[in-house]
Amino acid sequence: MDSALKKVSYSVFLDPTQNESDYFAYKIMQRWAQQQKQFAQDPKAAVQLHNQIHVHKDIYLSGLYLHQLKPELAKALASGLTQDTINNQTLTSMLEAHQVIDRARPQADKSVTDSVSMITASVNRLDEICGATIEQVVKAEVDSETIVSALKTALSPQHDSMISELQGLRALVKDQQKLIEQLINQAGSIEHKPVANVSEIKPISDVDARMSNVQKVKKKGIF
């Protein structure tokens, strides 16, 4: 009966002297080969030996996964394999460049974030104040209309009374004007009697005549 396990052998040809990625891979595999010999000589290192032998399977299958996902991504990672590029930042950049993940947005500065939060809070507060002010204005307009209506209702009788009084006064003034015109017409028709001229009235006697009479009476011995 055939075994369920299938052995697949594959040889990788590297050029450590001309390719930096090949040199890096060659040095790692060389170290693994030395460790595998040490684990094989140590009975207590059976688990480490098992993992060391089967590590190539994990490497090949993970590379196969990347190749099926993005062939160009697998090739880019292989060609850029160096000690300096094995980090999360390089891997993230590769994934973004090949559109495997969305490009990360730069994190905003904390001061900018705080300023935006303050501006947002101020705008919300301003909206609340404007809304309250508009409600007050509308209420004030309604109250003013109510007050004006009440004043019109209260002043309407007084207004009618004043109009009646003014009409009565106007009629009275017309009657007085007619009476004055009648008196003026009557005064113009009266005949004036002649008056004596003042210059024609002569005095009975003057002061010198009176003094002469007094002296005559005095000589006769009356005084």
Image (cartoon, rainbow, N blue to C red):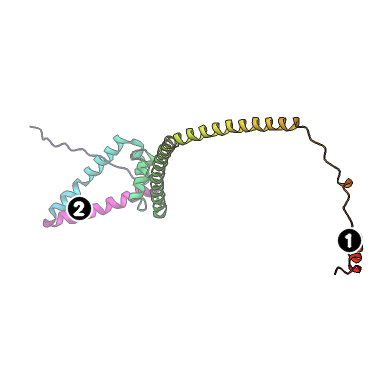
What is the magenta range? 16-44
Q: Magenta span has 28?
A: yes
Q: Picture coordinates of residue 126 (x, y %)? A: 41, 46
Which residue does the image show at 15% across and 49% down from the upper left? 50
| Left or right, residue 111 beside residue 166 | left
Q: Secondary structure at mark 2?
A: helix
Q: Picture coordinates of residue 178 (x, y %)? A: 65, 30
Quarter of the image that includes the N terminus: top left
- What amino acid type should be assigned to the residue bearing mark 1? Arg
Identify residue for label 2: 36
Mark 2 or mark 1: name the one nearer the start of the chain.
2
Position of residue 47 relative to residue 66, above or below, is below
Q: Picture coordinates of residue 61 (x, y %)? A: 24, 40
Which residue does the image show at 61% across and 30% down from the upper left? 175
Q: Magenta span has 181?
A: no
| Left or right, residue 39 beside residue 87 | left
Identify the main secondary structure in magenta. helix
Q: Looking at the image, which residue sits at the far left?
A: 1
Given this view, does label 2 or label 1 mark the residue nearer the observer? 1
Position of residue 175 relative to residue 218, above or below, is above
Identify residue for label 1: 210
Which residue does the image show at 40% across and 46% down from the upper left? 129
